[in-house]
Image (tube, grey):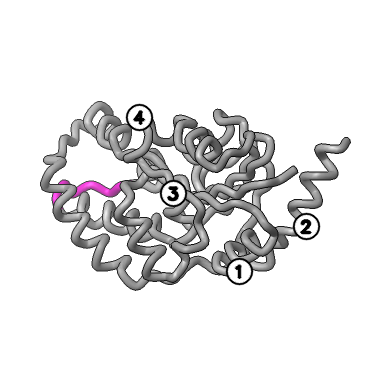
Amino acid sequence: MLKAIIMDFDGVIVDTEVIWYDIFKEWFQKEQNYDVSIEEFLICVGASDEAFFKQLAEEKGIRVDRTKFAEETKKQFMERSKDLPPKDGVVSFIKQVKQAGLKLALATSSMREKPVSHLTRLELLEFFDIIVTAEDVKRIKPAPDLFQAAIQKLGVMKEEAMIIEDSKNGLKAGNQAEIPVIVVPNEVTKHSDLTPNYRLIDSLVGFDVEKLKNEVEKHAVK
């Protein structure tokens, strides 16, 4: 029986990944005269950027002043994302989840300040029963810790939850946690290998939560 939905934040609720990719591309072109490919950027989508910088250093010999990078890109991101709307279908989906009597969690590799500020701005914070961030676990995605913490805090079993993700790292984390994952890729993450998944959909527009509940229940009975 489906009892809970766990949603990622970046790229699922608001389309921050596209903004981050543009910022990465612009910064590296200006500071390093280097064109960051979509494949390189995807390494850090849904996770930390450690692997991204490590690969650049080892394979390209590009070493970055991380403090400078963080300070300059964070300012740009905050400015460009301050008025971001929720992704298409997200508000309806979230309301359906609560109308269906399901618990709702947010599980993000981000620090708490960003998702909470955006959810508050979008008047969506009140719909979430719990929020689990990088501040609450030892390892972020692609490790399963965030999702394992979410089901523990919600008081449900892994078979009773469903994850909504957009990235390969998020999918890996969900699969390691043994929780089914519905993948809704964005313009950046659609270039990833997003298998295996419970379902791959283009958008949350028109998504029927009650239908999903019935589907999960029928599958469990079989």
On the image, numbered disc 4 is attached to which residue?
138
Q: Which residue is mark 1?
A: 92
- Look at the image and tell me in which quarter the C terminus lies: top right
Along the horizontal axis of the image, is 66 left or right of 205?
left
Name the kind of residue labelled 1 in the image: Ser
Q: Nearer the viewer, residue 61 or 7?
A: 7
Mark 4 vs 2, N-terminal side: 4
Pinpoint residue 4: horizontal percent, then vertical percent: 62, 47
Check disc 2 and report its element: helix, strand or loop.
helix
Question: Which of the two discs, 4 and 1, labels the residue nearer the N terminus?
Answer: 1
Q: Secondary structure at mark 3?
A: strand
Disc assigned to residue 131? 3
Q: Is residue 16 left or right of residue 198?
A: left
Please name the residue shown 86% across and 38% down the image: 221
Question: Residue 156 occupies which quadrant of the picture?
Answer: top right
Whole-Å distance between the Cαs marked 4 and 2? 36 Å
Q: Residue at x 68, y 67 (%)?
A: 206
Closer to us: 89 or 104: 104
